[in-house]
Amino acid sequence: MRKVIHGVVYFENHDRVLQLMKNFCSCKRSAYQAINKLKLSGNDIKVYCKRNYMPLLNQRYIADAAVEAGKITKEHSLFGNKKLWKRFQDKKISKKKWQHIRNSQLYSRGDKAKSGNPNIRIAGNMLLINDPLKRGLWLTGKLWLQEEIKSDCYDVRIEAKDNKFQVTVSYNVVNIPTMTDKKLGVIGIDCNPNGVAVSELNYDGNLIKHLYFKNDKIKFAKSNKRENVIREMAKQVVSYAYDKHKPIILEQLQFSKKNKGRKFNRMSHNFIWKQLLDSIKSRACRYGVEVIEVPPAYTSIVGKLKFMKMYSIPIHNAAAMVIGRMGLGIIDKVVVSISEAKDLVTLEARSVSIALKKKSFLWFKSKFRICQKQPALTAPNLEPMNNRHKIQVSSIGGKVIESNNWSGSYQQTCSVDFGEERLLDKFL
């Protein structure tokens, strides 16, 4: 498991730190060009970068810049921010600010062979940065971290943002043993733009309890406050699962970048589902709570058609229930009335109807068991009298002692499993 700790550092000689960041980011862009344009790989990338950056950066900084460039999978990438680049083109921000954004990071990997991190080290409440221009000189800064670091080998990333230096420290920790058991049931989770729906299920997939952790600040608060709200919400979800000793079933949300309309685009832009899911998974891993991910396609539709009216629960909790049942290996059977009109297929069940396109309906059928609802035994659905038979059953000996059809010409004797007199309608 990877442990991540955030903090803030303040430097007296911050100008030299910014210059070092500029050299590192420039080397990273040069390594990216070597990979994508010159098609270099391995040690050739570092050799290429040393030609221009060896006096400004040491070998370790250059190697870390090459590693960072290798993580970028896109062939054409814009270093900085695409929206800010557009603002810079429209002359809404200055060239100095744009350059500052592009050159605002410094990264150094930990190395066990080097007894920790060779370029950026943490000593108590001080952070030390190796200055390659002056051998043996370290740039020092006052450091505040969320919690104590419990490892000697750690990665450090420093980013200049909002007139301060933000620090992210990460390192590997020993995996905590799992404290949950699926045989006790599961906790189904459905993430939404304003909160998290939680449905607690037993091992058979039946609903025990449903909750909704709601906080509208996720949509409207600033980024730093939003991150705090997300962490608090993840803490609530994981604590609930930990107390119940049940694993969490999450959805694998993957929004495509296609234009799907103004309303969906606005929702998906403000919807920080990735941060929320990552926060839940990270905290669950630290507490030994097992996390299982399932595909979320059509879970809301199944929940609405089958469980929303049955249990009188909100649609999001019904979707969380379907997600939890999928984590238990249960594929729901949905009994609906199906009607077609032009390119749409309308599904109706429990006084709820949903319209799908035919292509979407075919994909829906491949994921769940969809059954056509049989007509009820009401007057409009009954067949003509001459096609039906009236059978009177008596409990004497478990046999039919008298049976007549409506025309008076049908008689039959058979065994039955019940012991009370009733009328059975048999359709021919």
Image (cartoon, rainbow, N blue to C red):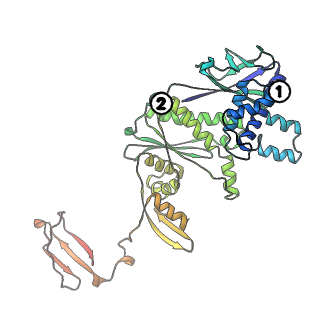
Please give the label number shown on residue 387.
Answer: none
x and y, in percent, of residue 267 in the image: 67, 51
Query: Element under label 2?
Result: loop
Q: Amino acid at mark 1?
A: Gln
Pointers 1 and 2 in contact (C-beta within 8 Å): no
x and y, in percent, of residue 56 in the image: 81, 25
Note whether 57 is above or below 357 in the view shown. Answer: above
Q: Residue at the left extreme?
A: 397
Tag 2 residue: 288
Q: CA distance from mark 1 to mark 2?
A: 43 Å
Tag 1 residue: 19
The residue drawn where x is 21% and y is 75% is 391
The residue drawn where x is 46% and y is 60% is 366
Structural crowding at the residue carrying mark 2, measured as other residues with C-alpha within 10 Å and reported as few (<14), some (14–19) or many (≥20): some
The residue drawn where x is 71% and y is 21% is 119
x and y, in percent, of residue 320 in the image: 50, 47
- Is 304 on the left or on the right of 138, as rendered? left
Comparing 116 with 276, the one in front is 116
- Is 349 on the left or on the right of 233, as rendered? left
Structural crowding at the residue carrying mark 1, measured as other residues with C-alpha within 10 Å and reported as few (<14), some (14–19) or many (≥20): some
